[in-house]
Amino acid sequence: MRNITIIGAGIVGIATACYLRRDGHAVTVVDQRPPGEYCSFGNAGILSPGSIVPQSMPGVLRKVPKYLLDPLGPLTVRWSYLPRATPWLLRFLASAERSRVEKTADALLPLTGKTFDAYDPLVRHAGVSDLIRKTGYVVVYERDESYRGDAFAWQLRRDRGVEIEELDAAGIQRRVPSLAKIYERGLYLPEQGYVANPERLTKALAAQFERDGGSILRREVRDIKLAPHGPQALETDAGPLPVETLVVCAGAHSGELAAKLGEKVPIEAERGYHVMYSDPRIELPLPVSSAEGKFFVTPMEMGVRIAGQAEFAGIYAAPDYRRADVLAKHMQRMFPDVSMADTTQWMGRRPSMPDSMPVIGPSAKAPNVYYAFGHGHIGLCGGAPTGRVIADLIAGRPPAFDVSPFRIERFS
Ligand SMILES: Cc1cc2nc3c(=O)[nH]c(=O)nc-3n(C[C@H](O)[C@H](O)[C@H](O)COP(=O)(O)OP(=O)(O)OC[C@H]3O[C@@H](n4cnc5c(N)ncnc54)[C@H](O)[C@@H]3O)c2cc1C
């Protein structure tokens, strides 16, 4: 058994900690924040085995100017940050090539496809199975033309066995009666689901991990002390912490840490927002996504949450809550009866790679380091499957799925 240190107590770090502890390792998680209070706090909660379509798709270059010019659009770039974002954005655009997209979808399928299966033992053990809801979700389009424009994305899913039912306007109303009658086209994906409170999920798994003998330290990692074989100690705000085996699960900050280990990766903080309606006064039986607006509205145990937007402004820039106001406008259009009485806003940093695939697997440089970061839009969905496969790799078991497409060397 090994002494393993994990940097990061988001859903990826905590799920990894749970799986490693189940194997009997001595596991310590280090994070300057309490578990689940960074990006894993405020996502849309979607657990989607069918999330295999990358963000960069054929035709994306044509769509970007339209998105940027639309004040209610899903994408913004802070102009002062554009020069720094450009190398990442160029790689992102290069990933849109059709055959690469097919390969990405093939690679993602065994990761996201096993999300319910991988969470199941963890949530049962922690006594929070109630948080996982397999309701399916609905995707809606205001214009048939937009639906036709997404044909390749839907075909990618169908080709890989994702179950999809088409809905006409009446079918949409039957599934979600509180929706505005503005949608021409819809799809119901019965095998998908959601987490009713992503923060509580991470905290509950973290608490169970501690009850099982794991330890969580509230410390910021400021540097990594290297020996010839790899990292020897973490330099933290509370002094050095010796390490034997290290797993980097630091979300959008993982690039800074990988760089300290001599490995450069193109990772961006793709900032997203949510608005939480604590007393929405609408009935929402299952999550609904606007394909054109690129957001999800999810029924949670704390109310209803709309989450989306992609803002490129750098990891440390202050939130621009006008992006959350955009989501609130969409919410009113989608659900005209929603009550704005009690709302809060939030911004989070998706750890996004330009090819929409996380980095999962061993370091190319240090034998005692593993990486599990860069899950972008699918980090909640990919959290438990990633934790399980990292435990397989460290144990020397055949991995639950092929991790070779996720290796860090793909960027060198
Ligand atoms: C608006 C929005 C909607 C989303 N919707 C969904 C969805 O519906 N489904 C889905 O699957 N995903 C969704 N996502 C993405 C998902 O939330 C992320 O991919 C996921 O939370 C990433 O988890 P993580 O554990 O890698 O990172 P994080 O949750 O960000 O955790 C990283 C942790 O590392 C710690 N850390 C960083 N640097 C250091 C350091 N130097 N020292 C100590 N600790 C450090 C941080 O404090 C943090 O706690 C959404 C994201 C956003 C923004």
Image (cartoon, helix red, strand yellow):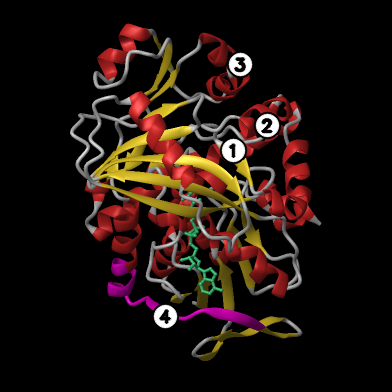
Highlighted magenta segment, given as a residue range: 207-224
For the point 25% across and 31% down, the residue is: 338
Q: Which label is found at residue 217?
A: 4
Q: Position of residue 274 (x, y in %)?
A: 40, 45
Image vertical order of residue 253 relative to residue 87, above or below? below
Does label 3 point to a residue whose CB lies under 8 Å from ligand 1?
A: no
- Count all numbered tags in the image, as a single digit: 4
Q: Is 126 displayed left or right of 309 in the figure?
A: left
Going by the numbered disc 4, the residue's amino acid type is Leu
Q: Earlier in the sequence, mark 3 or mark 2?
A: 2
Please, what is the three-letter code of the amino acid marked with disc 1? Leu
Instruction: Tell me which corner region of the image, top left, top right, bottom left or bottom right, holds residue 178.
Output: top left
Residue 63, position as x, y percentages in the image: 67, 26
Task: Say which element carries label 3.
Answer: helix
**Residue 75: image tag:** 1
Observer-side mark, 3 or 2, equals 2
Which residue, given by chain and number where applicable, does mark 3 sit on? 149
- Sequence-wise, which precedes: disc 1 or disc 3? 1
Q: Give the label, 4 or 2, closer to the camera.
A: 2
For the residue pair 410 and 182, the one nearer the viewer reads as 182
Quickly name the residue at label 2. Answer: 64
Q: Say whether mark 2 is within 8 Å of ligand 1.
A: no
Q: Nearer the viewer, mark 4 or mark 3?
A: 3
- Whether residue 12 sits left or right of residue 352 in the image: it is left
N-terminal of the pair, mark 2 or mark 1, is 2
Q: Nearer the viewer, residue 288 or 12?
A: 288
Question: Of the residues tagged 1 and 3, which is closer to the observer?
Answer: 1
Three-letter amino acid code of the residue under disc 2: Val
Query: What's the distance in space between the residues labelled 3 and 2, CA to CA?
Result: 14 Å
As drawn, the label of residue 326 is none
Q: Could you give the CA–CA distance between mark 4 and mark 3, rounded to whole angstroms?
A: 48 Å
